C-alpha cells in the first residue's frame, strides 16, 4: 500500500483551535484556582492550630507537674505568663501596664485602652463583625510566629475568677485575623487543664458562640471545641 503525500503530512492545530483550547483552560483555572488557594490556606490554619494547641497543652501540664507538684492555680496574669514563657524558647512577653517592644508587639504601651483599641481594629468575629476586646491583660510572642493572649476578668464580669487564653496561630500581622479562623479561645481549668472554649461547662458554648448568623461580639469564641472535634471544620470556614 502506497500512501499519498497528503496522507503523510502531519496535521497541526490551527491558531483558532489553540486559542479556543487556551480559553477553555483559562475558564477552568479561573473557576478552580480560588477554591484551591482557599483550601490550602485553611489547611495551613488547621495545621498551625493543632500544633499550637498541642504545644500549649503540653507546656501547661509540665508547669503543673514539674513546677507546682500537681496542684496549680495561678494568682495573677503575670504568674501565668511567666509559668508558660519559660517553656517557650526565645519568646517575648508584655503584661498590661508595661512598655512593650514595638518591634515585636502591636502596641508599645500595653495598658489602658491601647490593647482594646488594637484588638477591635485588628480582629473580627467568626462571620466578620466587630469583636469585643477581652484579651487585653497580657500577650506573648512565640518564635513560630504565633501570639498568645491572656485575660482575667474584673469582678462583676461573667468570666471573673477564670483565666482565659487565646492563640493567634499565625500572628496578628497575618490574615484572616478572625475568631474561630486563626484566633482560638481556651479556658484554663483545674490544675492547668487547657479546655477548648465551646465545650459544655465553658463560658462561651459552641452552639451560641460559633454561629453563622450571630452578631455577638464574642461569636467565634465557642469554635475552638468544634475545631478540635470536627475533622472538616477548617474546610467549612465562612468567607
Image: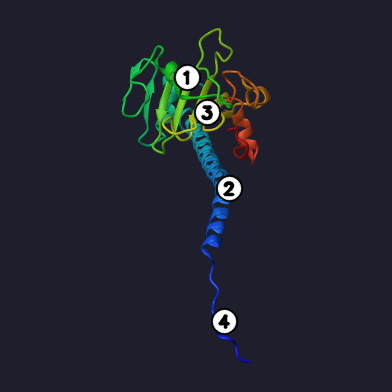
Residue 148 location (% of width, % of height): 45, 28
Specify the quadrant of the image occupied by residue 212: top right
Identify the residue shown where x is 56% and y is 7%: 156
- Label 2 sits on a secondary structure element that is helix
Residue 160 location (% of width, % of height): 55, 13
Q: Earlier in the sequence, mark 2 or mark 4?
A: 4
Residue occupied by mark 1: 120
Q: Earlier in the sequence, mark 3 or mark 4?
A: 4
Residue 32, disc: 2
Q: Camera-side residue: 82 or 209?
A: 209
- Label 1 sits on a secondary structure element that is helix
Q: Camera-side residue: 58 or 27?
A: 27
Q: Earlier in the sequence, mark 4 or mark 1?
A: 4
- Looking at the image, the residue that sits furthest to the bottom is 1
Labelled pair 3, 1 in contact (Cβ < 8 Å):
no
Residue occupied by mark 3: 178
Mark 2–mark 3 Cα distance, whole angstroms, equals 25 Å
Residue 18 location (% of width, % of height): 53, 61
Number of marks drawn:
4
Q: Camera-side residue: 75 or 131?
A: 131
Task: Please state which of the two labelled residues, at mark 2 or mark 3, is closer to the viewer.
Answer: 2
Residue occupied by mark 4: 6
Mark 2–mark 4 Cα distance, whole angstroms, equals 42 Å
How crowded pointer 1 is (Cα within 10 Å; few <14, some 14-19, many 20+) is rated as some
How crowded pointer 2 is (Cα within 10 Å; few <14, some 14-19, many 20+) is rated as few
Labelled pair 2, 3 in contact (Cβ < 8 Å):
no
Q: Is residue 157 above or below residue 71?
A: above
Q: Earlier in the sequence, mark 2 or mark 3?
A: 2
Amino acid at each position: 500500500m502506497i500512501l499519498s503525500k497528503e496522507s503523510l503530512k502531519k496535521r497541526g492545530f490551527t491558531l483558532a483551535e489553540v486559542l479556543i483550547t487556551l480559553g477553555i483552560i483559562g475558564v477552568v483555572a479561573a473557576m478552580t484556582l480560588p477554591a484551591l488557594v482557599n483550601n490550602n490556606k485553611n489547611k495551613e490554619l488547621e495545621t498551625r492550630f493543632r500544633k499550637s494547641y498541642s504545644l500549649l497543652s503540653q507546656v501547661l501540664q509540665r508547669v503543673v507537674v514539674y513546677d507546682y507538684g500537681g496542684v496549680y492555680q495561678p494568682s495573677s496574669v503575670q504568674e501565668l505568663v511567666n509559668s508558660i514563657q519559660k517553656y517557650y524558647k526565645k519568646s517575648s512577653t508584655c503584661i498590661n501596664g508595661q512598655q512593650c517592644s514595638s518591634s515585636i508587639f502591636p502596641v508599645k504601651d500595653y495598658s489602658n485602652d491601647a490593647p482594646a483599641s488594637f484588638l477591635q481594629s485588628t480582629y473580627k468575629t467568626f462571620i466578620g463583625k466587630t469583636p469585643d476586646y477581652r484579651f487585653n491583660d497580657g500577650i506573648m510572642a512565640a518564635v513560630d510566629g504565633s501570639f498568645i493572649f491572656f485575660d482575667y476578668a474584673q469582678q462583676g464580669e461573667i468570666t471573673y475568677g477564670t483565666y482565659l487564653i487565646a492563640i493567634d496561630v499565625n500572628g496578628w500581622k497575618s490574615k484572616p485575623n478572625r475568631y474561630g479562623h486563626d484566633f482560638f479561645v481556651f479556658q484554663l481549668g483545674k490544675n492547668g487543664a487547657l479546655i477548648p472554649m465551646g465545650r459544655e461547662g465553658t463560658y462561651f458554648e459552641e452552639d451560641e458562640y460559633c454561629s453563622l448568623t450571630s452578631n455577638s461580639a464574642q461569636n467565634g469564641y465557642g469554635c475552638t471545641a468544634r475545631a478540635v472535634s470536627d475533622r472538616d471544620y477548617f474546610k467549612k470556614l465562612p468567607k
